[in-house]
Amino acid sequence: MTRILIIGAGGVGRVVTHKCAQNPEVFTEITLASRTLSKCETIARELDGAIRIASVDADQVQETADLIRKVDCELVINVALPYQDLTIMEACLEAGAHYVDTANYEPRDEARFSYEYQWPYHQRFQEKGLMALLGSGFDPGVTNVFTAYTLKHYLDRIETLDILDCNGGDHGLPFATNFNPEINIREITANGRYWEQGNWIETPPLSVHQPFTFPEVGEKEMYLLYHEEMESLCRHIPDLQRIRFWMTFSEQYLNHLQVLQNVGMTSIEPIRIGKVEIAPIEVLKAVLPDPASLGPLTKGKTVIGTIAKGVKHGVPRRIYVYNVCDHQECYREVHSQAVSYTTGVPAMIGAKLMLTGDWMRPGVWNMEQFDPDPFMEALSQNGLPWQIQELDPHATLDP
């Protein structure tokens, strides 16, 4: 019997729980925990009570470790907030459980996410015979696996890598984010950053952009951002000369964001209102739609993939690996939109490969450090089929 604990009952937590329940041969007993127990109760009703639920404050190491011991779980899937990664990792070390997350640690008081906080845990996990798998979402996560798969099967070396994230969905609301508003807005309003020839190069927020024609969606304007998978890929992929990350945004979304920035609502610096101190972005998060509520509203598709340029047997090649995911199909299956679906399914797959032994190795690891083949096979079996196009190696990004 394999017991797991899922921490976090938002949109991604809902998907992870549903998908784990669809694989009972691996996940024989599932406990879903959140600070807000009512969210767990809703998901449990969707699954006809097939899971257990619990309340936990994941900011508290001891409380989290006590819950891990209570449910006697072998592995914890962390789909809570990135601020809580380190406390959950500490709890796993104390209680003796493997660990999976979908996004790297970010301090509450600084818009800066980096693996430098989690990589130093490697020796501690190794000494305990435990494994921590970092960034088992889509990007980071599947994009790392796409890169490793391209290097294993299509290129002898990757020279440049571009990661492209397009959400072609429409929820009909004036302004809403498809995942946690606070994390989403902090990510977008930060400086852009890409890696080239061993150096990080910064750009003003959203200042670098270009159109791209995405399969099944069409032409969208995409913007250069900093994203965490670049940090591990430039470390683990040999011969890489440049890596960039791009994400699409509508003009309406950017106009709303600009107004919010202009009036100070995206700031993470606390301000005093009467006797209370609160960051404006926390107020904004409270008034924006809950991303978990967007499932029935969102129509259209996401397209996320990697374009790797390099050489195979001395011949230049350019390989595009991507997934297309339909928002409404996701909602029909797991009551969630495609942004949560594309993050939650890979979290389940990462945990599954650990528990079956395919990816089990004590220590702290990123996705591209493992054999990509079983993960790619599992993607197709669990609702995220992928496609490969060979592009003109001498062309620009637009195929």
Image (cartoon, rainbow, N blue to C red):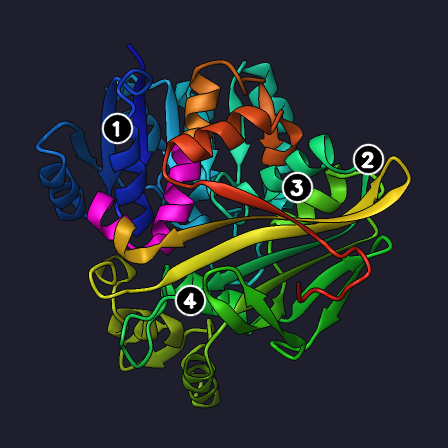
Q: Is residue 295 left or right of residue 183?
A: left
Report the disc number at residue 147: 3
Q: Are marks 3 and 2 in contact (CB under 8 Å)?
A: no
Q: Is residue 253 above or below residue 169?
A: below
Report the disc number at residue 224: none
Find the distance from the CA under tag 1 to the CA under tag 3.
27 Å
Name the image quarter holding the C terminus: bottom right
Point out residue 99 in the picture as x, y percentages from the top left corner: 45, 29
Toward which corner of the image does residue 355 lie, by quadrant?
top left
* Residue that carries the numbered disc 2 in the rendered image: 156
Is residue 326 at all visible to an observer of this figure? yes
Find the distance from the CA under tag 2 to the CA under tag 1.
37 Å
Point out residue 175 in the picture as x, y percentages from the top left corner: 33, 78
Q: Is residue 399 left or right of residue 282?
A: right
Sequence-wise, which precedes: disc 4 or disc 2?
A: 2
Report the disc number at residue 168: 4
Q: Give the residue drawn at x 55%, y 49%.
A: 322
Q: Secondary structure at mark 4?
A: loop
Is residue 279 at all visible to an observer of this figure? no
Of 248 and 86, the residue lying toward us: 248
Sequence-wise, which precedes: disc 2 or disc 1?
A: 1
**The residue stretch that appears in magenta:** 330-348
Toward which corner of the image does residue 178 lie, by quadrant?
bottom left
- Amino acid beneath label 2: Asp
Q: Is residue 106 magenta?
A: no
Q: Secondary structure at mark 2?
A: loop
Point out residue 387 in the picture as x, y percentages from the top left corner: 54, 44
Report the disc number at residue 22: 1
Point out residue 69 in the picture as x, y percentages from the top left corner: 30, 19
- Amino acid beneath label 4: Gly
Q: Give the residue drawn at x 60%, y 15%.
A: 127
